């Protein structure tokens, strides 16, 4: 994890069904050099909810394998528990759009991104 | 009334690395501009040069339609579904990443560059079945007409590239002086015109090589060739994903 003392670390929770893709996304976030990011994640939804409750989370990334119903349920659940936490649908599976999506989400005022198209 | 957005070739992101050089029409990787987040469902348009013997090791994708159009050389693909293939100038490659796929791609030739357009389009649904396709097309395109090279998967012509989105890509090999109309195939879609080579006029804008022009709110777009030109048209839904 790249710690930058000037800018507070942003904490991410990543949930996705493919363990190898999840591992890749977590590695990309934790190794990112241009900002201070810290990421935890799970392929298990209940474990993801526990992490959300137990850890400081600024942004949730929903990745591959979550069906549209589950995605909607998760968004509602997170929003009820901590409405200030942003929930982001990650597309592309790797580094291509990951940091763009995060930058856009952190700079905007809304809390849901990228999932309305499939709701 | 048509709305347009012009992206000049000189205003693309320029990235150099050990394995190649890239020009991004839209924000990609850790390069970000809020005014460059795509055009409707078209999110990525990368003009990549892969050096001889170089490439990209195994890496994941999900929920994205990835089209590779080779402009020069060859690109060798392998993926976690055990597909192998070589894309070249008259054979495009499509990855419907769906619920997830790992792949690698290399320029295996030790002597020549590979130059590809790598294009990402958001799918119209999440977590479809991952899919790999190669589709042949005529290169150079027949003169002064549009050759469809990508169409929606549900239209089902396996001879043409197919993606999980209501999008159509066409190539044009236009002769100097010709004006060729492109009627959009679906109401509400927009058209992104990428000039591979040459000099054209579209909607009152003059485009030179590697310029891009997005057009929305129009049912037909007329492309006028000011020189002999190669044009890539990308018709996509004007969805906003971010």
Image (cartoon, rainbow, N blue to C red):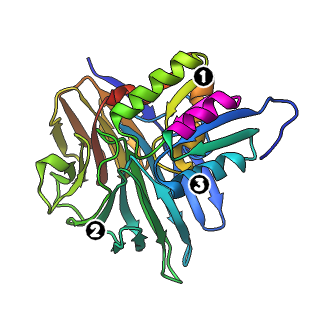
Q: Chain of mark 2?
A: B
Q: Which element is circle 2 on?
A: strand
Residue located beneath label 2 in the image:
B91
Q: Chain of mark 1?
A: A
**Visible in this render: residue B40?**
no
The answer to whether residue B112 is magenta is: no
Residue placed under numbered mark 3 in the picture: A23
Q: How many C-alpha atoms fall within 10 Å of the one at disc 1: few (<14), some, or many (≥20)?
A: many
Tell me the subunit letter for badge 3.
Answer: A
Q: In this picture, which residue range is highlighted in magenta? A: A46-62
**Gap in angstroms between the C-alphas marked 2 and 3:** 33 Å
A104 relative to B37 in the view: left or right:
right
Residues tagged 2 and 3 counted as in contact (Cβ below 8 A): no
Few, some or many C-alpha atoms within 10 Å of disc 2 (few <14, some 14-19, many ≥20)? many
Residue B233 image offset from top left, x and y in percent: 28, 45
Calculate the distance from the C-alpha at mark 3 to the C-alpha at mark 1.
22 Å
Q: Which mark is residue A85?
A: 1
* Quadrant position of residue B143: bottom left
User: Mark 3–mark 1 contact, CB under 8 Å?
Assistant: no
Secondary element at tag 3? helix
What SS does tag 1 mark?
A: loop
């Amino acid at each position: 994890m790249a710690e930058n003392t000037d800018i507070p670390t942003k904490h991410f929770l990543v949930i996705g069904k493919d363990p190898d893709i999840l591992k890749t996304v977590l590695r990309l976030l934790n190794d990112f050099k241009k900002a201070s990011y810290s990421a935890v994640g799970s392929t298990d939804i209940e474990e993801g909810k526990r992490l959300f409750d137990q850890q400081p989370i600024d942004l949730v990334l929903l990745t591959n394998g979550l069906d549209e119903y589950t995605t909607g349920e998760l968004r509602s659940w997170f929003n009820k528990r901590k409405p200030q936490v942003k929930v982001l649908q990650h597309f592309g599976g790797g580094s291509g759009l990951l940091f763009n999506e995060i930058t856009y989400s952190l700079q905007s005022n809304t809390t849901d991104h990228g999932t309305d198209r499939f709701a | 009334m048509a709305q347009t957005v012009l992206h000049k070739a000189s205003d693309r992101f320029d990235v150099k690395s050990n394995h190649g050089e890239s020009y991004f029409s839209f924000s990609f990787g850790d390069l970000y501009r809020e005014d460059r987040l795509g055009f409707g469902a078209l999110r990525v348009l990368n003009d990549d040069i892969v050096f001889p013997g170089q490439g990209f090791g195994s890496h994941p994708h999900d929920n994205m339609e990835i089209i590779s159009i080779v402009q020069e050389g060859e690109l060798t693909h392998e993926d976690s579904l055990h597909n192998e293939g070589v894309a070249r100038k008259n054979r495009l490659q499509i990855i419907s990443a769906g619920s997830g796929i790992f792949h690698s791609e290399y320029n295996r030739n030790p002597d020549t560059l590979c130059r590809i357009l790598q294009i990402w389009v958001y799918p119209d649904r999440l977590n479809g079945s991952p899919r790999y396709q190669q589709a042949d097309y005529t290169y150079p395109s027949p003169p002064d007409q549009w050759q469809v090279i990508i169409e929606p998967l549900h239209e089902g012509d396996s001879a043409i590239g197919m993606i999980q989105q209501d999008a159509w890509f066409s190539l044009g090999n236009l002769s100097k002086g010709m004006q060729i109309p492109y009627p959009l195939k679906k109401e509400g879609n927009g058209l992104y015109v990428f000039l591979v080579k040459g000099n054209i006029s579209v909607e009152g804008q003059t485009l030179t090589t590697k310029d891009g022009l997005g057009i929305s709110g129009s049912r037909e777009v007329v492309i006028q060739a000011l020189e002999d030109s190669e044009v890539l048209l990308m018709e996509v839904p004007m969805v906003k994903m971010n």
